[in-house]
Amino acid sequence: FLCAFTAPELLATLETEYRVETHDNNDDARRLLTIWNRKLGRSSTPILGPTDLACPSGREETSQYFTELCGRNVQCVVASDSDTRLSNRHSHQFGNTSSGVKNNEGDT
């Protein structure tokens, strides 16, 4: 799990944008992540993306990028991954939500 707490210097080298593109049907929303080198800025070519985190291939591309960048296995997860759908539980805390706390008796 790569985050600002485990890799702050590395993440500080990146500039990111996350945007949701919706169409007539919200089920078809794209959740796009784009990453640039912070020193080069947004006028440069993105080093990743935009990649769609709403689809498995986009999450895999993101996972692979961060794994190569930091040299540690990084997995992009969502609450609806297969083992979660079966048990309605997950072991991850998603951002500033209480989902992991509620589903794991207060343990994140």
Image (cartoon, rainbow, N blue to C red):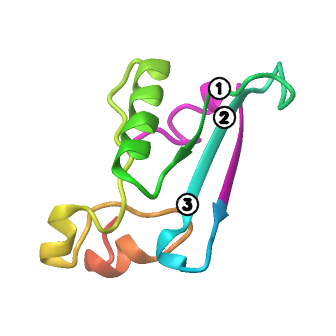
Residue, x 81% and y 22% (percent of image)? 44
**What residue is disc 1 on?**
9
Tell me if residue 15 comes above or below residue 17 in the rendering: above
Tell me if residue 44 comes above or below residue 26 in the rendering: above
Q: Which mark sits nearer the N-terminus, 2 or 3?
A: 3
Kind of residue sitting beneath label 2? Ile
Task: Give the extent of the magenta segment.
Answer: 1-19
Residue, x 55% and y 60% (percent of image)? 30
Q: Which mark sits nearer the N-terminus, 1 or 2?
A: 1
- Element type at marker 2? strand
x, y percent for residue 66: 47, 29
Q: Nearer the viewer, residue 20 or 36?
A: 20
In the rendered structure, the answer to whether residue 87 lies left or right of residue 39 reads left
How packed is label 1: few (under 14 Cα within 10 Å), some, or many (20 or more)? few
Quadrant where the C terminus sits is bottom left
Residue, x 12% and y 74% (percent of image)? 86
Q: Nearer the viewer, residue 51 or 36?
A: 51
The reply to whether the magenta stretch includes residue 34 is: no
**What residue is disc 2 on?**
35
Tell me if residue 32 comes above or below residue 4 in the rendering: below
x, y percent for residue 15: 74, 35
- Element type at marker 3? strand
Q: Which mark sits nearer the N-terminus, 1 or 3?
A: 1
Residues under numbered marks 1 and 3 in contact, where contact means CB atoms less than 8 Å apart: no
How packed is label 3: few (under 14 Cα within 10 Å), some, or many (20 or more)? some
Q: Of tags 1 and 2, which is closer to the observer?
A: 2
Q: Of tags 1 and 3, which is closer to the observer?
A: 3
Mark 1 vs mark 3, CA separation in Å: 29 Å
**What residue is disc 3 on?**
30
Disc sitting over residue 91 in the figure: none
